[in-house]
Image (cartoon, coloured by chain):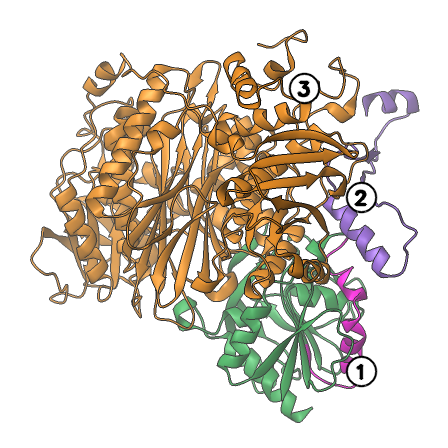
Amino acid sequence: MRVAVVVFPGSNCEQDVVYALESLGGEADLVWHRQDDLSGYDGVIIPGGFAHGDYLRTGAIAQLSPVMSEVKRFAEEGRPVLGICNGFQILCEAGLLPGGFIANRGLSFICRFVDLEVIDTETIVTRGLEPGRRVRIPLNSYQGNWVDPTGAGRVVIRYLDDPNGSQDRAAAVANDRGNVVGIMPHPERGVDELLGSTDGQMLLNSYLGSLVTA
Amino acid sequence: MTTLTDPPHRLLGMTDAEHQSVIDILGRDPRPAELAMYSVMWSEHCSYKSSRTHLSRFPTEGEQVIVGPGENAGVVDIGDGWLAAIRIESHNHPSFVEPYEGAATGVGGILRDVFTMGARPIALWDQIRFGPLADPGNRYLFQGVVSGIAGYGNAVGVPTVGGEIEFDPCYSGNPLVNVMCLGILRREQLVLGTAGEPGSVAILLGRATGRDGIGGASVLASASFDEESGEKRPSVQVGDPFEEKKLIEACLELYERRLVVGVQDLGAAGLSCATSEPAGRAGVGIEVDLDAVHTREPGMTAPELLMSESQERMLAFARPEDVEEVLAVAARWEIESAVVGRATPGETLTVYHGGQVVAEIPAASLADAAPLYERPMSRPDWLDEVQARSFDGSGLDIGQTLLELLSDPAIGSSAWVHEQYDHMLFLNTVIGPGSDGTLLRIKGSEKGLAVSTDGNGRLCYLHPRIGSARLVYEAALNVAVTGARPLAVVDNLNFGNPEKPEVMWQFRQAVEGISEACEALGIPVVGGNVSFYNETDGVDIHPTPVVGLLGLADPAPADPPRLARATEGMDIWEIGPEATTGLAGSAVQRLFGELGGMPTAADPEAGRRIIELAAELAHIAPVLHDVSDGGTAVALAEICIASGMGASIEIDHPFSEDPHRFLLVSEPGSSGLPDGPARQIGRMGGSTIVINGRSVALSDAANAWRHAIPRALEDSATT
Amino acid sequence: MTVNRRPEIADPEGTTVEHALHDLGYAEVARVRMDRVIHLEVEGEDPVAIKTRV
């Protein structure tokens, strides 16, 4: 079971994601955005960072990369596709998740731990958890404010308070099938007690578990 | 003051004597492009002409030193094949002109200094100083600078993990923006700024060159200074963190694959420096073809191309057989590249443009023959009076004073600033912003790297030598409380106008103070930066040296002390020499009195002992906290606020800022204190902070502390 | 109201979009500059007076 962690020019959380997955027994490879063949991988993660500098619109240029056709194929085939932070933004731009992002309501970058609540357990990151489960992981973003005029979005994890104005206090959103999830806070930053929290492990374990059942 | 009838060299900021030196070196009048190069390379910022003679005082040796001052960053051995690269730089004047981009490009520049050595930059620290926030101009600068550091640091993908903030009226027209960077590398990947052997090829990597940073006095291109010609106006440097990120990854791949023999980043003095310094270091000549430089502006002249400070550019030197692969690596990382020259036998730097030779000078002369000034120094005649001032803090109400200190934006919570910085990226930040020292882990090893950056303009104004020495001890203790032992120092010396003897005296005294302290602690200075001319309307800033100190913990504590680990019933100890009044230059004096008095000098013996003690205790104590701004009272309050618990202490000088002291909080009977100067001063418990019988509700203290900066920004906005 | 940077000032955003367009096959795009358009809704009756104010 191998996970492809996609790297765009400007991505910067990919090493952290690989570290976190491997600490949980997962196997992952870094895949450059120009690669248009992900056969051999069972799941995909698009990590955080600033793909293309967030220029034009966050995720707007990234979603045109060759690798995205494979990411879309994964989505269609029901394979696990997880976008973290910038990855969430890219999935929205690619049309794989509803809505889009604007600047945090406070108009500054936010880097701090946030408290989350699991709402919906029928997704690749929440399967096996109970509704109402609390998760405490870091939020690190400037455009973390999710907006969805269609109202079609399926919010699966919510912020307990409201750090950035996100619609519905959405911290993570899924597609109907539950195999494509975007999450704005960083599960991979919550895998070490020494660094403040191990709550990210339950989300990533759920993701790794979903590779098997796909 | 220059006028339009002045000769070109004066318009470029050179003195007549400097101009004559160039003539003497060349044996003829310089060509325009040559003059341009000498003018930038011999500027104060690039040549350190006013400071070099004093900087040689620093102790720079030690068995841990791999690369000392003189290269782009200092490099030290941290054991097991790992090296650490550190550098500190200032971007003061550009940040006053354009706070966002000034600060942003400051971050970009220091990152390049570190990754040009072969290291991956893993963390940044910022030391920022402004006039009081009551003034809207200062608020604008403060917010702009923080945004710029955040905008660049976050986007380039290097965490900003700590720093310091100071406010004083002397910085109103002269904000100080200093940035320190730490990188790590395996020993085999160390790369120096050398051009290599004759025949090695110079490849320019990164952003296209434009007119960024070039002064308006581009007389060399036209006879008259044409105000209408927008092209000749100075252009603000705009940073591109995305380009820098790609450049970092491309360079790291080049190093890993051993495809380059030397690398130099392009900073101040751009191509002039990046071509001449590596050639000088290698003892070779170099040929440069300006037509090959990839540009974003048409029609740039040779002087412009040589002086441009366009950001995000590196110059790599490669063996001819590796050139194609270097260009391929650049292409894969989507950065532009161009072969712009080659190293030659001999010692001449030859520059071609439009097929003509536009410059032909001894390569090393740009760096090595730079003027060296021994500017006059004299102790300011106002200093005796200032040092004789007395300040009696004994009548102050302890509770009220504590609340005022906690509400002060330089003392209260820095969350408003540090929550704008991604300080968690890379999963190395064990102890992050808002603590005494930063502690970073190195995955795959037991090691920890600790850093503290410390400056204190007011203390150094009162006594530059004592004040500067104390910064080193302060920084060393800040890293010791994380479990690390001091390893090396970099310094950023921010001063006023060096043409004033008083300022030069302050400068020399600061260098002495830092040197003495480093010698006493056995740590070398491995690099530094000087920023002069921080002066407005004839008024200089306080002498503001900033010390950046790197420490190594091997092993790092498995469960390091944290301010939040105090619990009910724990004993509170003050460790260190007994405090004296210690209010000269203190925070309390800043709030309630006039700057003055004689600061307590550091005590090398006590300093060493306390630092060692702290580093040992860090492996077993739940809470260690250095005593600095606001004295023991503030240090205690910070522990209480973090732990959510009150405390009660009795202490003679609650606000004294005397050096070499820290607090230890631990279970009764378990302090593990070896023999040493230590006094139990109280105990944790309850919901009030009680100092000498005076109480402050914990919730009031926490509120004051938490909202210090937001309130300072908002209060002012409504007046 | 359009706010643009002076032509000689660097425009990282424009350069990045330009490269992206080239990647997509639009080699004929010579240059991209990103500017800001600001829409102001201003109350008042007299267009000339309003324009002067703005």
**Disc 3 versus disc 2: distance between alpha carbons?**
29 Å
> Amino acid type of disc 1?
Glu
The chain letter of the green chain reads A
Where residue B667 sits: x, y (%)? 17, 66
Q: Residue furthest bottom?
A: A213
Where residue A62 sits: x, y (%)? 75, 63
- Asked whether disc 3 touches disc 1, contact meaning CB atoms under 8 Å apart, the reply is no
The residue where tag 2 is placed is C34
Camera-nearest residue between B158 and B89 = B89
Extent of the magenta region:
A56-81
Tag 1 and tag 2 share a subunit: no
Secondary structure at numbered mark 2: loop
Where residue B431 sits: x, y (%)? 38, 59
Secondary structure at numbered mark 3: loop
The chain letter of the orange chain reads B
Q: Nearer the viewer, mark 1 or mark 2?
A: 2
Q: Is residue B554 magenta?
A: no
**Quadrant of the image occupied by residue C39:** top right
The residue where tag 1 is placed is A76
> Amino acid type of disc 2?
Met
The chain letter of the purple chain reads C
Where residue A211 sits: x, y (%)? 64, 88
The residue where tag 3 is placed is B217
**Quadrant of the image occupied by residue A91:** bottom right
- Asked whether disc 3 touches disc 2, contact meaning CB atoms under 8 Å apart, the reply is no
Image height of A41 relative to B372, above or below: below
